[in-house]
Amino acid sequence: METISEGTFRSVQFYAVAQRWKTELDFFSSEAKFLHDLLETYESIYFSHFFREMIRGMDQQLSKLECRCHKIDKVLTLQLKVLELMVGGVVKENTVHLESRQIKLENCVATLHAEAREFKKSLFAFVELANGCDGAFSIGCQSGGPSLEKLVK
């Protein structure tokens, strides 16, 4: 019976975690497409310059998040390939270097996740506010929801 060395076991653990991150990044990419479509829909509905500028600003924020997601995805894909080779015994394991990259990736993914969550909170607050406005888009809105000033960064 073949035994797994501690290094190989660590590589397998890193691989499982990295694969989960890959899935999260893939989901965010799909989710970003939906959010861009949502912003586009709201932009086509509202005639107020203020609302349109808010929507464009949110769209730019989302594009920046997507760009970071793609950069992280490239590094993560490379990490997964290296891990596959290590686990398969094709490449010698370098757990120190591997662990360092894994920690950096973890920080990048966690930061992206937190920023995406904050972005979605702002977007959802905007949608609630916009849906509460009853056509008075050129003069503002006096609904009981969040104020426009809180949504503008």
Image (cartoon, grey):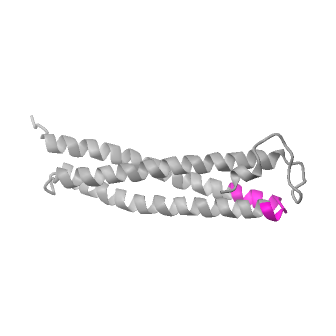
Extreme residue toward the left, this view: 1
In the image: residue 82, left or right of residue 105:
left
x then y, percent, for residue 130: 79, 50
Residue 54 picture quarter: bottom right
Extreme residue toward the top, this view: 1
Q: Is residue 46 magenta?
A: yes
Quadrant assignment for the N terminus: top left
Residue 109 seen from this side: yes
x then y, percent, for residue 87: 20, 49
Give the magenta-colored segment's residue range: 38-50
Q: Is residue 13 above or below residue 79?
A: above
Residue 38 picture quarter: bottom right
In the image: residue 73, left or right of residue 102:
right
Residue shown at 85% from the left, 48% from the top: 133
Residue shown at 35% from the left, 60% from the top: 75
Q: Is residue 63 magenta?
A: no
In the image: residue 121, left or right of residue 12:
right
x then y, percent, for residue 119: 60, 51
In the image: residue 86, left or right of residue 62:
left
Residue 88 seen from this side: no
Q: Main secondary structure of the magenta part?
A: helix
How many badges with numbers are in the image?
Answer: 0
Quadrant assignment for the C terminus: bottom right
Residue shown at 75% from the left, 44% from the top: 146
x then y, percent, for residue 60: 62, 64
